[in-house]
Image (spheres, grey):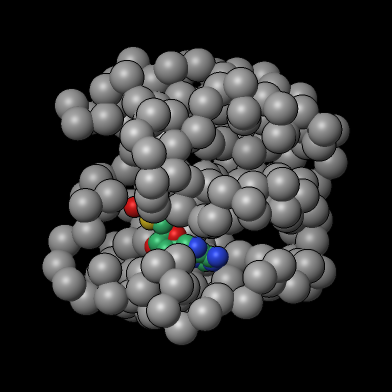
Amino acid sequence: MTAPTPFSQDSALSPAAWEQRYQAGTPRWDLGQPAPAFHALLAAGDALPPGRAIALGAGRGHDALFFAQQGFEVTAVDFAPSPIQSLREQSQAQQLSLNLLQKDIFDLTPELAGQFDYAIEHTCFCAIDPALRPAYVALVAELLVPDGELLAVFFTHQRSGGPPFGTTPTEVRQLFESHFEILTLEPVTNSIPSRQGEEHFGRLRRR
Ligand SMILES: C[S@@+](CC[C@H](N)C(=O)[O-])C[C@H]1O[C@@H](n2cnc3c(N)ncnc32)[C@H](O)[C@@H]1O
């Protein structure tokens, strides 16, 4: 898949605009820690077997590093240079080996098609143009092996505008059901205080 829409230089969703947000200081979406929902998932008694995982729009990679710490073979993708550099430094400091790609997620296939057991989503779906959501669903399905899983924290806020552009559980079901079996899609109960009531955790298995 090639990027469905080339970005104009001044688009708020362009790589340059995201890079500028990182350069401007602490990005407000950056939790500085893995998403609590992923923590709970991997701490559960029936935790997932480690496998090959791709973190989409990984940012500074707190989730990507966490999955790597838990034995997953992680590829982390972001098209902005600063977060990838930060992730490189963090992974070296922690002596973790991650595959880091500074790339548009929509340029990952066909090269990486069918290469992953898991895709990790945390505020990437809500960062892209909502018009690209069907393409995002197709992309994730293409990246995964059959029966591979999307592990997602969806930002289900109801504010207008964006990014981040909110979604709803209903929209998630409508968009993903063509390619995925929805194993779990439920409100997150251990969100950080500023996101309480605004997150859903999903486990979706590729059909
Ligand atoms: C809201 S941030 C979330 C970052 C990280 N997942 C987190 O939770 O801290 C969205 C990230 O997606 C990246 N991004 C947005 N659109 C992208 C695209 N088409 N390809 C690759 N990265 C993208 C941005 O650069 C940014 O780092």
Residue 108 appearing in the image = no
Q: Count the marks: how many? A: 0
Q: Residue at the location (19% across, 31% down)?
A: 194
Quadrant in the picture for the C terminus: top right
Residue 128 appearing in the image = yes
Q: Nearer the viewer, residue 12 or 72?
A: 12
Residue 94 lies in what quarter of the image? bottom left
Q: Quadrant of ligand 1?
A: bottom left
Q: Is residue 183 above or below residue 146?
A: above
Residue 7 lies in what quarter of the image? bottom right
Residue 27 lies in what quarter of the image? bottom left
Q: Residue at the location (63% across, 52% down)?
A: 131
Residue with the most extreme left position:
25
Quadrant in the picture for the N terminus: bottom right
Q: Would you say 85 lies left or right of 38 here?
A: left
Q: Would you say 41 lies left or right of 60 here?
A: right
Residue with the most extreme front position:
160
Which percent across, then down, holds residue 201? 48, 26
Which percent across, then down, holds residue 199? 39, 27
Which percent across, then down, holds residue 120? 54, 46
Q: Would you say 149 lies left or right of 29 here?
A: right
Which percent across, then down, holds residue 122? 45, 44
Q: Residue at the location (67% across, 19% down)?
A: 183
Q: Residue at the location (77% across, 28% down)?
A: 177
